[in-house]
């Protein structure tokens, strides 16, 4: 693929992360250069939503997939529960030179994207360190966080360079990772602990890191199991990475909460399959015991079923 200057960006997923980065890119490229592409049914449901970002009305546009045209870059900021639908929606905005970046949770979305659209144009990525809360059509955040991304073995290097240049222009903190797979597993390890524990206990960043508490025990136990599974998968993460993640959680707003705890409040289907679902599946392949993740998986499914 040829090096290109990215001037039109399509987001799939108009939640907290999409609005946060979409608004940052729109400030530089203009509101017309950023669009949120939705399947037509979702568009009908949400096009009239009055969204606010840190109290200010948002002018970010939504576009029907049936009316969308190819973008220079597509960024996926959906929940993985909607990935199959999102891939169909993307057909409209992926042209021959379109680059694709996924900021979905977990470690499986890029594989599914690449199966449909090719690894050459796809980068692996995560975002971390933001404290975004998106409830009742209002996004609030203090920390915009950062994007960590990098190439798969088959990604065209020009694609990585072009996306990095756009993030720089938009003032989005980012790091191009030489070993992005390790970074993704580290993030998954944290999510398996913090998202699931806060969901099950109705917790916050404050309660889940409280010393000596049952929630902190759940947090660390679930993360440690994920670490063992990662090692079995050939990914070198260690106890020091786990400690670093717990320390990071201790710096977040104690009243704040991760997305899965917000799902519990809003009664939305969670990404449990991407978290303990992935850990339990891989653990079974390697003959590893993961009782904490099994328990969290079961509890989350029970809570969802009670809605």
Image: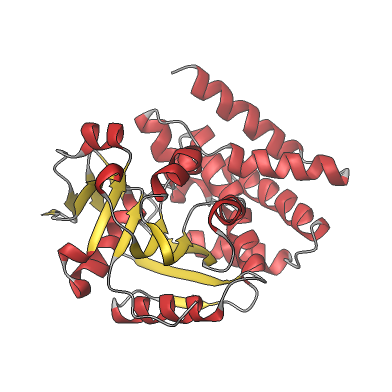
Left or right: where 270 falls relative to 217: left
The quarter holding residue 241 reads bottom right
Q: Nearer the viewer, residue 10 or 23?
A: 10
Q: Position of residue 12 (x, y in %)?
A: 36, 50
Q: Residue at x 44, y 42 (%)?
A: 88
Q: Is residue 72 left or right of residue 209?
A: left
Say which of 37 and 241 sits in front.
37
Position of the C terminus, as image quadrant, is top left
- Residue with the most extreme right position: 287
Asked whether residue 132 appears in the rendered view, the answer is no
Is 195 left or right of 229, judged from the image as shown? left
Q: Tell me the residue at 41%/36% (across/down).
A: 263
As displayed, is residue 146 above or below residue 22? below
Residue 159 or 52: which is nearer the viewer?
159
Query: Which quarter of the figure has residue 74?
Result: bottom left
> Where is 174 relative to 307, above or below?
below
Q: Residue furthest front?
A: 96
Where is residue 128? Give x, y as percent: 46, 63
Expressed as whole percent of the image width and height from the top left, the position of residue 221 reads 70, 47
């Amino acid at each position: 693929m040829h090096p290109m200057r990215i001037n039109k960006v399509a987001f799939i997923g108009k939640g907290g992360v999409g609005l946060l980065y979409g608004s940052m890119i729109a400030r530089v490229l203009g509101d017309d250069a950023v669009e949120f592409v939705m399947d037509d049914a979702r568009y009908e449901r949400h096009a009239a939503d009055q969204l606010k970002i840190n109290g200010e009305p948002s002018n970010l546009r939504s576009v029907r997939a049936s009316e969308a045209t190819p973008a220079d870059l597509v960024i996926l900021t959906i929940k993985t529960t909607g990935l199959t639908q999102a891939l169909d929606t993307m057909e409209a905005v992926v042209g021959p030179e379109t680059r694709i970046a996924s900021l979905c949770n977990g470690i499986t979305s890029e594989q599914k994207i690449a199966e449909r659209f090719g690894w050459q144009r796809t980068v692996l990525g995560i975002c971390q360190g933001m404290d975004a809360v998106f409830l009742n059509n209002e996004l609030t955040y203090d920390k915009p966080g950062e994007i960590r991304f990098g190439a798969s073995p088959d990604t065209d290097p020009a694609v990585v360079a072009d996306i990095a240049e756009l993030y720089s222009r938009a003032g989005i903190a980012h790091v191009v990772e030489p070993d992005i797979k390790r970074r993704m597993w580290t993030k998954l390890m944290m999510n398996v602990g913090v998202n699931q524990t806060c969901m099950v206990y109705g917790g916050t960043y404050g309660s889940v890191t409280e010393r000596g508490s049952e929630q902190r025990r759940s947090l660390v136990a679930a993360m440690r199991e994920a670490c063992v599974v990662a090692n079995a998968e050939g990914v070198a993460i260690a106890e020091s990475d786990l400690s670093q993640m717990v320390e990071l959680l201790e710096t977040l707003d104690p009243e704040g909460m991760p997305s899965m705890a917000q799902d519990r409040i809003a009664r939305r289907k969670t990404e449990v399959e991407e978290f303990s679902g992935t850990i339990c599946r891989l653990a079974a392949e390697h003959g590893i015991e993961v009782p904490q993740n099994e328990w969290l998986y079961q509890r989350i499914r029970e809570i969802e079923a009670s809605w």
